[in-house]
Amino acid sequence: MIRNVLASAVRPALHARTATTLSAGFPKASTASLPTKKYGGIYTVTLIPGDGIGNEITESVKEIFEYVNAPIEWEQYNVSGMSSEGEDLFKQAVESLRRNRVGLKGILFTPISQSGHVSWNVAMRQQLDIYASVVLCKSLPGFPTRHSNVDFAIIRENTEGEYSGLEHQSYPGVVESLKVSTRAKAERIIRFAFDFALKNNRKKVTCVHKANIMKLGDGLFLNTFRRVAEEYKGTGIEHNDMIVDNTSMQLVARPGQFDVMVMPNLYGAIVSNIGAALVGGPGIVPGCNIGREYALFEPGCRHVAQDIMGTNRANPAAMILSSTMMLRHLGLDNLANSIASATFDVINSGDVRTADMGGSATTSEFTAAIVKKLGA
């Protein structure tokens, strides 16, 4: 079961909410949807380091897990999206996820050129129906940014919309791209958002849309939201809706007004990046992708950071915190608490900071600082 993901100590006192910042009262997983323990209570988890800085930040996770003796055995697949030649390995990784049901993943590169392969990040979510992306953006006391009151969850539909991948050239110079919207998938993600709010003591759910222009596609999403919201009236959860362009402005002007946000696929990609920028960048925003049978944990802001690959300068915090979410999913709460608390202690102390946080520490030094906190 995916439950409270990070230690409650990280929530500032100004919030009355008792649930933790990276809480996740997600739909209860059946025993069959969890990986099978091996002899000695060890879980086998699929590991896909990803492109760019993926190897470096997953090595940080492996080092920390080894130090705390986490009961995890990695089934690693070094898939790369840099070329289509790795398709066979990608298929093996997907089969591994089917077996293990839980994975930790970096971001796979997706080529822009027309001759390039489709996004394997998207393909993985679609093939396994990992329909809900959850990204939590929260101000950290030890890393001040322009706004100090950011604390919201972005819940994004993962499997349809503009990411359906249905496009063609109907005439030279004329391209048609299809956005697929279904009531069933809209209702599924919207109910997920309201349930998330309920189980995490959140107060409001905001639907992000562009129904003023896409009256049928986004209109379906918005109307489904309003209908489902009526069913939750008795819970005390407020609801509202906002056009996506206004949402972008409101996020940078008054982010404190948002609590839980639910939206179609493309808007989620954009809003997640804005949210990450509000709290300090992609290096500190963890995330996860949830389906009925499978759970895949990865940094919340999906960047490969190819420009700093191999330089030992990447911030591994987002991947480390994503891994603690995975530990909680497996019921290993004490380990998750310890690692998350140590990570936040390092960030909040300000003594060891990577370049993205205004410091000069290396990935290895940041990881070592967390290990030192764990041993204190």
Image: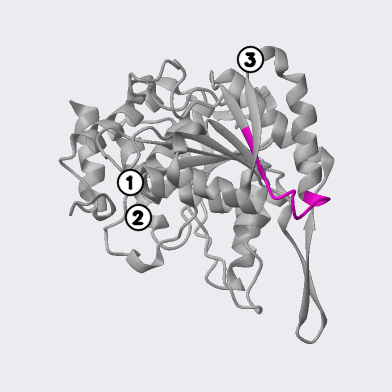
Residues under numbered marks 1 and 2 in contact, where contact means CB atoms less than 8 Å apart? yes
337 left or right, relative to 43: left
255 and 83: which is toward the camera: 255
Where residue 24 appears, x then y in whole percent?
Answer: 54, 27
Marks 1 and 3, how far apart in space? 42 Å
The residue carrying mark 1 is 60
Residues under numbered marks 2 and 3 in contact, where contact means CB atoms less than 8 Å apart? no
The residue carrying mark 3 is 236
Where residue 287 appears, x then y in whole percent?
Answer: 50, 41
1 vs 3, front mark: 3
Where residue 14 appears, x then y in whole percent?
Answer: 35, 20
Does residue 216 belong to the magenta stretch? yes
Residue at 39% across, 31% down: 70
Query: How is the model colour-coded?
Result: one colour
Up-down relation of residue 119 to residue 288 (above or below): below
Residue at 54% across, 22% down: 202
2 vs 3, front mark: 3
Which label number is shown at residue 56?
Answer: 2
60 and 248: which is toward the camera: 248
Where residue 215 appears, x then y in whole percent?
Answer: 81, 51
Range covered by the magenta-colored residues = 206-217
> Considering the image in quadrants, where does the C terminus appear?
top left
- Which circle's residue, 1 or 3, is located before the other in the chain? 1
Question: Which of the 4 image quadrants contains residue 360?
Answer: bottom left
Q: Secondary structure at mark 1?
A: helix
Pointer 3 local density, CA inside 10 Å: few below 14, some 14–19, many at least 20: few
